[in-house]
Amino acid sequence: MAKAAKAADQFMNFAGVESRTDAVDSTVAEETELRTGLSVRGKLIWLIHQVEWWPTVLTGNIDNIRMAISTRKGLGIVPALTDDGTVCIMENRMVGAAAAGLAEDDSPKKLTFLPPVPIASPTLSVYIASTQNHADAVDKLCAMRIGFTTSELDSAAYTEIVETWGW
């Protein structure tokens, strides 16, 4: 169970989440839920400053792996960047990776948001899928770490964030 969010932070916090591709068909989007600890009564938001991800599934000739963070649950697909509630999309294109000698990639990828992305949702959904159902992509792990601070808002600003990103 997630801890309740606290008042404004001076330093960045990190929330980690691990996601696996589908155990049978890696093109089927899998969803992992991350609790933020935010509530409508708290008038607190997360300011997402960065997202780091480790696509540890990159062994073999996987076409590409896509992950997304969204405020919307139960989509059944990896949402597009333009879909309501999508915070970000990470994609790693690895066409012919093994043949090119790039089969292992253990360095994190990092997205930085300036200004940070404000989120008021009590949960975030992380989606993962590959573009081709390949044996090397089935039931593989990807890890993600979200760097955020919390901030207090007045009622008008809080309502604006909720209307923009959803609850």
Image: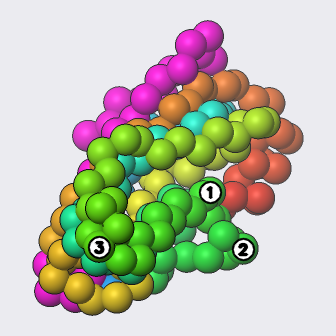
Quick check: marks 3 and 2 in contact, CB under 8 Å?
no
Asked whether 18 or 138 is in front, the reply is 138
Mark whose residue sits in front, 3 or 2: 3
State yes or no: residue 12 in magenta: yes
Mark whose residue sits in front, 3 or 1: 3
What separation in Å lies between label 3 and label 2 (alpha carbons)? 34 Å
Q: Is residue 140 left or right of residue 61?
A: left
Looking at the image, which residue is at 27% across and 89% down? 133
Name the amino acid, label 3. Ala
Q: Is residue 164 left or right of residue 3?
A: right
- Secondary structure of the residue carrying tag 1 is strand
Name the amino acid, label 1. Val
Looking at the image, which residue is at 35% across and 30% down? 3
- Specify the label residue 87 is tagged with: 1
- Specify the label residue 82 is tagged with: 2
Q: Give the percent coordinates (x, y) of residue 107.
A: 37, 41
- Specify the label residue 99 is tagged with: 3
Q: Is residue 143 visible?
A: yes
Badge 3 or badge 1: first in the primary sequence: 1
- Secondary structure of the residue carrying tag 2 is loop
